[in-house]
Image (tube, rainbow, N blue to C red):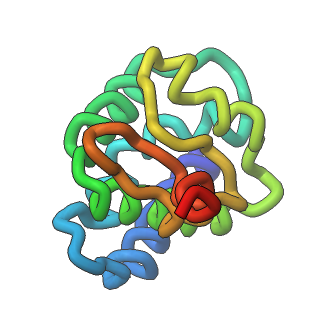
Amino acid sequence: MAGLVKLACLVLACMIVAGPITSKAALSCGTVNTNVAACIGYLTQGGPLPRACCTGVSKLNSIARTTPDRQQACRCLKTAASALGSGLNAGRAAGLPKACGVNVPFPISTSINCNGYREISSVRMKLEWIIPML
């Protein structure tokens, strides 16, 4: 029970800290955190993947359709991941979209540059791949 209270406080703290970080994105960190809250136990303690986690990941993927929204979701998730610190299992986090059957256009990593991804002509490409071609 104490672990659940700590988890709820962590999610709330992430929502308060990261909430104001919106730039041209309609998606809020509160929305992002709410959708992935069911995943925190799986990402930190292991065990079976909760159905509610995959439901949230799928919903988040469907509401974050524009580049600014995807970048905002990325920033929110990075903030939440840093709040979890060493308790986060990076391998499980990286594999979460695939485990939930959701295709995301970027790798899941705490070191990702959230601003380095753009959608061009409906094809999602990493900006660093485009610059050398110019």
Above or below, 37 relative to 10: above
| Depth order, front residue of 120/69 | 120
- The spot of residue 55 in percent (x, y) is 33, 25
Above or below, 25 relative to 47: below
Report the residue at 67% width, 50% height from top: 109
Report the residue at 31% width, 41% height from top: 60
- The spot of residue 103 in percent (x, y) is 44, 26
Res. 53 in view = yes
Looking at this view, name the residue that lies furthest to the front. 134
Report the residue at 34% width, 65% height from top: 29
| Depth order, front residue of 55/74 | 74
| Depth order, front residue of 123/107 | 123
Res. 6 in view = no
Q: Quadrant of the N terminus?
A: top right
Q: Is residue 27 left or right of residue 45?
A: left
Above or below, 73 relative to 35: below
- The spot of residue 99 in percent (x, y) is 56, 17
- The spot of residue 15 in percent (x, y) is 39, 70
Report the residue at 61% width, 41% height from top: 107
Looking at this view, name the residue that lies furthest to the left. 26
Quarter location, residue 132:
bottom right
All told, the count of numbered labels is 0
Looking at this view, name the residue that lies furthest to the right. 86
